[in-house]
Image: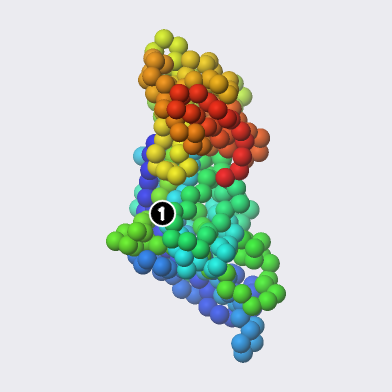
Amino acid sequence: MASVNATKYGVAGSSFGSSWTTARQTGNFVTNQPSTANSTALMVVRGSRGGVNYRITRAFLAFDLSAYAGQTISGLTLTFRQTSSTVAGGLVIAILKSTAQGSGSTFSDLTTSEFYSAIDFSTDYQDFIPTMSSSNSTNIQILTAAANLDASSGSLRLVMVQSQNDANDVTPTSDQNENGNWNLDTSSNGFIPFLTFIATDWGKEVNGVSVGAIEKVNGVVRNTIEAINIFTGVDGCYSFLLQDPDNPSGWLTLYTSVNPPSSLDVDDVVYTSKDCTNPYVGDDADFLTVGAGGPQLPACGGSDPTVMTINEDGEITDIQCAPI
C-alpha cells in the first residue's frame, strides 16, 4: 500500500463583496503550505451588515505520483485532519479536479489567478457524499475511478470546496458562515494531507507487447485494469486485500482457497498464510474491500464498497454492500 503526502497545498479565497459571481470567480488572497493547527480550508460566508456581502475560500492540493506513472492506481483515498472549529454540525463538501499549482514533480505555489479558472466543476473526485465534521479527527475520503485514472498519469491535483453553494453555484439566500477547518501543524496532532492507494506495475511488456502500446485487454481500457492474474500463493491459495476503516494506511493481505476470490461467501474461511493453513483471527470488525469491490472480491453496484466481517475462526460471517 503506497502513501504519498501532498507536495503543494494551499488555500485561495476572495474578499468580501456584494456580488456572488465576483466572490466565486475572483481570488484575492493565497496562503501556501500553511502549518497552523486550526486554519480555514474552505468556506462560504454571506453577511448582511452594511449590505449583503459574500466571501469564498477553497483548499487546493497537488500530489507528485511520478514514481507510479504508467502504473494502474486503485483504492485511492484522500486523508486529512479536520478540526472542531469547523461549523457546528459539519458541512457537505465537494472534491473536484484541479489544474492549479503547476505540473512536474515539484509543482508550483498556488496563485490567485487559479482560484476559479483552474477548477473543473464538472469532474467530481469523491466516491460518496463527503463531509467535514466539527471534530478533531482524521477525515478519510474514498476517491472516484476518474481520480484513480488521473493519478496513473504521475500526478493528481484536486480542490475541496463547500458543496451546497460553491460547487453548485447557488447564491446563499440568508446569512451563513459555512466553514471547514483543517490541522496542518505536525507538532499538534496535525499532518500534511496524503493519498493512499495500490499501484500495480505492469512491467515493460505483457506477452511481449510494450505496455505503452497496449490500449485495451479483452476490451477493457488498460488504465482501468487493476490486475490481469490474481496472485497465487501456494497450492491453490489466492490473495486479496482488505482495509480496516479505522486504519486508512493499514492494508491486510489475506488468502483463500476459493478461486476466484470474488466468489467468497459467508462461512468461507480466510487465512494469513500463503498455503491457507493459518486462519485469520478476526474480531467481527468490518473491513472494506479494495475500492468499490475491487477486482478480487464481490463488487457492489454503484459506488458502494463491499464490507466483510470475519470472526475469530477466520470465517466470513457477513458480506454486504453498504455506504460508509
| Left/right of residue 271 with respect to residue 221 in the rendered view | left
Residue underneath mark 1 = 193
Q: Residues within 10 Å of mark 1 (few under 14, many from 20)?
A: many
Which quarter of the rendered picture does the N terminus lie within? top left
Residue 90, x across and y down, in percent: 56, 63
Residue 30, x across and y down, in percent: 44, 70
Q: Residue at x 45, y 39 (%)?
A: 244
The residue type indicated by label 1 comes to Pro
Above/below status of 93 relative to 156: below
Residue 305, x across and y down, in percent: 58, 37
Task: Please identify the residue farthest to the bottom as the structure is shown.
Answer: 50
Q: Is residue 133 visible?
A: yes
Task: Please identify the residue farthest to the left as the structure is shown.
Answer: 187
Q: Residue at x 52, y 45 (%)?
A: 142
Above/below status of 146 relative to 221: below
Residue 265, x across and y down, in percent: 58, 22
The number of callouts visible is 1
Q: Residue at x 44, y 56 (%)?
A: 137
Q: Secondary structure at mark 1?
A: loop
Q: Residue at x 41, y 16 (%)?
A: 276
